[in-house]
Structure formats: structure tokens, C-alpha cells
Amino acid sequence: MSYNETDLLPGQDLAHLLPPSWKDDIQRWFAEDTPSYDWAGFVVGEEEQEAILWGKSGGIVAGAPFFTEIFAHVGCSVTWLVPEGTAIPDGVKTKVAVVTGKARHLLLGERVALNTLARCSGIATVSRRFRDTAREAGWTGVVAGTRKTTPGFRIVEKYGMMVGGVDPHRHDLSSMVMLKDNHIWATGSITAAIKSVRRVAGFSLLVNVECQSLAEGDEAVAAGANIVMLDNLVGDELHGAAKALKDKWRGKREFLIETSGGIVEAGLRGRIGPDIDILSTSAVHQSCPHVDFSLKIQPKKK
């Protein structure tokens, strides 16, 4: 198995990664959606009902633990009919899950749960396309997202990337040292920035340095960077710089080369190559179309 393999092994479940603290978000989501009286919910009462979750557009189903826990918060249960990570077809309605609970509670959770599921599934869908395009091209590197996520919703969006099969990249400022252009300009040089951060970050954190040229990449490797991010370099400039760095430092330093900046789905193939280890892009999670779902309470038989 290659180091960038993203498929789960039998018995593995991404939901097991989630920290207990994420459930605190649910209360905030409900407080936003129902800050005062639930006028419409008043009319439907407390009778036990069953609702069908329908997938109405094609995409990857992602966000099951969030959907389930949102309904559990209002006393409802969810039975999934389609496993998370499954691609549902476009153009036909797919029965994805059944939700059972009191009518008023089903409607309380409906929009919060649907919004979360639609967003997470949209990210997983685009992530899967990026991953598959890279694999079809024969590239064995890592496709990754970025930290450019929605404030307060990062755990959902990063989860969607993982369901789609891409690397979520660093989860926060504490996960990895990333020295970008502003850090370097404020410090004075790439070398000074790396030496400074190594004093406090120690051996256990990787150092990723944003570089605008071959010369900057060379300085970063010489100073001990673990990852050289060739930012906004394209075409021959990108691949030439990557090859030159690998050739010069082969057998002397271990490091990875990352390409980033302005990468969209149509341009992915032009940014991957034999000397590129990581491709990171916010296109897998920003401006992604949502997957369309609806929740319909089943009419009582007369």
C-alpha cells in the first residue's frame, strides 16, 4: 500500500476520528436556527412519525455522524440505508435513510441536519473527483485540501474531504508549522524563520515553507524544511524547480515538494508530476455545489 492510500480498510469508520467536543456545536446550530418560539412546530404535535431522507442529486453521501447526532439531540433515531461514502446517482431519487421520532422534533432537526449533510456531501463529491482524476493520471502523490474552511464548521468540512478520499491537510495552526510569505517577510529570511521556529516547535512538528522560486526552495531545504511548497508556480517553472531540488538534495536531505495556489479541477493534471509529492487546493471545499437532499414525513394511512 502506498503512503497516500485513502481507501478505508474493512471495519474502519471515519466517525471514530471525531472528538467528543464536536457535539457542543449542535447546541449552537439549534440556537441559531430556533432562537425563540417554534411557531410551525406547534401545529404538528408530538405523534410518532417516520420520515424518509431522499437523495435528489448525484454525489457522495458524507456527514452521517453529524446528521445522526443532530436528530439524536431532539430524541429521534436514524436508520441508514446507504453507507457513507457511497455515490448516489443523478437524475433519480434515492432513499438514503429513515428518521423516526415525534413530528415536532423531526421538523426541528430537519434543516440543521439537511444543511450539514448537503455541505459535507458536496465537499466529498468534489474531493472524490479530484482524487480519481489524479489516480487516473497515474500519479501516486497526495491530493489535499487547505485550512481555508468556514469558521465554526471546519470539522464537518475536513470530514467531507476525508470521506471523498483526499488528505485534509493541517487541521489548525497547531497541527504543523507553515511559514508563509508574511512570516518570512516579517522575520527577514527563510533561514531565520526556520531557525526561529525550530527553537520552540521542536522535532515533532513538520515545517512547511511557502516558496516563490527555485532559489527560495533551495534555501528552505538547506535550512531544514520538511516540505517545500512551490506556491503559484506552474508549467515548466514548477516541474523544473521540483526536479532541480530533488536532484540537488537527493541522498542529502529528506523533504517533500508541494504544489499549491490557484489549482482548479480542470488544471489538476498540469500540476502533478514525478517530482511533486503533494497537491493542495481549496477547490475541494470552497464553492462546492451541495448535494441535494430532502426529508419527507410519510403520510399516515387512513
Image (cartoon, rainbow, N blue to C red):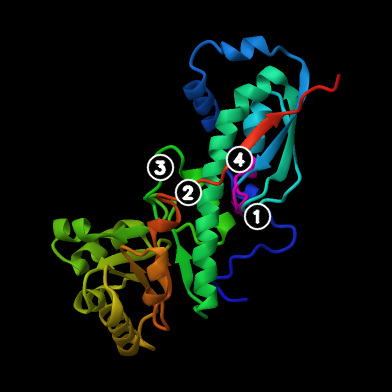
Q: Name the kind of residue labelled 2 in the image.
A: Pro
Q: Quadrant of the C terminus?
A: top right
* Gap between marks 3 and 2 measured at Cα: 15 Å
Mark 3 or mark 4, earlier in chain: 3
Give the structural element (helix, strand or loop) at label 3: loop
Instruction: Name the residue: 67% across, 49% down.
Output: 92
Would residue 21 be visible to someone looking at this image?
Answer: no
Q: Quadrant of residue 284?
A: bottom left
Please report the bounds of the magenta region as a residue range. Answer: 57-65
Q: Quadrant of residue 186?
A: bottom left
Give how far across and how far down residue 76 sits, in percent.
72, 27
Give how far across and how far down residue 275 sits, in percent.
39, 82
Numbered tag placed on residue 89 in the rendering: 1
* Gap between marks 4 and 2 measured at Cα: 12 Å
Furthest-right residue in view?
Answer: 302
- Residue 217 left/right relative to 113: left
**Which of 97/14 is in front?**
97
Numbered tag placed on residue 289 in the rendering: 2
**Which residue in the protein does label 3 denote?**
150
